[in-house]
Image (cartoon, rainbow, N blue to C red):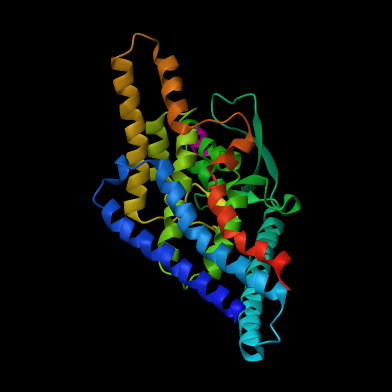
Amino acid sequence: MMHLHLLGIALAASFLVRLLSRSHDSLRAQQPMIQQSWQNRWHRAWVVLVVPPLLLLTTAFSVVAMGYSTAHPWDGQLSYAVALCFVIAAIAVWLRLSWSAFRTWQEMHVYPMRPIQIGKRTALRQKQCRILDVPAVFSAQVGLWSSGLWSSELVVSQGLLDHLDDEHLDAVLAHEAGHDYYRDTFWFFWLGLLKRLTCWLPDSESLWQELLLLREMRADRWAARSVDTLVLAESLMSVMTAPLLPASVCAEFSCAAPHSRLAQRIDALLSIETALAQDCINSENSENTERQTKVDVMAEPASDWATALKIVPWEWIALSLMPLLIIPFHR
């Protein structure tokens, strides 16, 4: 009976988190998006999307690990069967996404590599890039199967190289460097797994879309450290084609987003430019120095890749893993 109660509590808590988040969204909608903190939006979307499925998954795994109770055969077998089905479903989703990532990696490796410069400020760091011989305007970071998707390769289409001049191409490549820096292919593979596993929970799709938007905004802000924000906004408007690769295994500049979300990205870039212009007016320092100082603050630069881990709300992740602590005390 206890096992069935554990599953029920985890399910009720998952729905409660989503419903409370929905009520919070109704209040948050009264505030303009551009005035809302990127960190707060990211933290909230991360927690609300990840914690419920992770809590359900760890609870189900704990029930399976403890086995079914012989004192209450019917309840014990029912809870064990439900938990086992959920764990098997999680493994099936993981296998499907892993196979998709592996096939994508295989397909990309038939295209040649070419060194491409990433932005003016990183001219000394050459980026190897795979060129798709297609006319579509497209660029993406594709996860490397050999590194468990932790590392990624830049993939661009010949259509992108033909469509953009050097200045706008630098902006696109700087954006893709942001995806690579924050390991977006790795994190969004696992986020996509949790989202697919619990697509039946309320607001799963809207939370997923919010994280996709914030991921792109973060890469935009990273790119704004090395390229002009107006050029980046122009590049964003130019590269508006549907992605060729699944979003779970790549992070693309030309992501297919609703016009409202595209407008949010452009508004965020223009707000950086407005802040820079105002800062230059009120400052006696050189324009280049002020630009770099201001944008560095807004882009939240890091000393190395480990800083990307700091944006993950680990305290909430630890809370959702607490059902695993029951296993050693089970008799």
Q: Position of residue 222 (x, y in %)?
A: 49, 34
The structure residue drawn at horizontal position 61% and vertical position 60%, both measured from the top left corner, is: 322
Q: Residue at position x 67%, y 90% from top?
A: 73
Quadrant that contains the N terminus: bottom right
Query: Residue 31 vs residue 268: left or right?
Result: left
Residue closer to the observer: 162 or 29: 29
- Whether residue 126 is visible, yes or no, is yes
Residue 134 seen in the current view: no
**Residue 290's image quarter?**
top left
Report the span colored magenta. Answer: 168-172
- The residue lying at 33 percent from left, 34 percent from top is 270
For this rendering, which residue is in front, 197 or 75? 75
Q: Is residue 169 magenta?
A: yes
Q: Residue at x 40, y 11 (%)?
A: 286
Q: Position of residue 280 (x, y in %)?
A: 33, 17
- Left or right of 318 on screen, residue 26: left
**Quadrant including the C terminus:** bottom right
* Outermost residue toward the bottom in this view: 74
- Look at the picture and state if 274 lies above or below 220: above
x, y (%) of residue 251?
Answer: 55, 50
35 lies left or right of 289: left
- Residue 78 in percent (x, y) is at 62, 86
Say which quarter of the image contains residue 328: bottom right
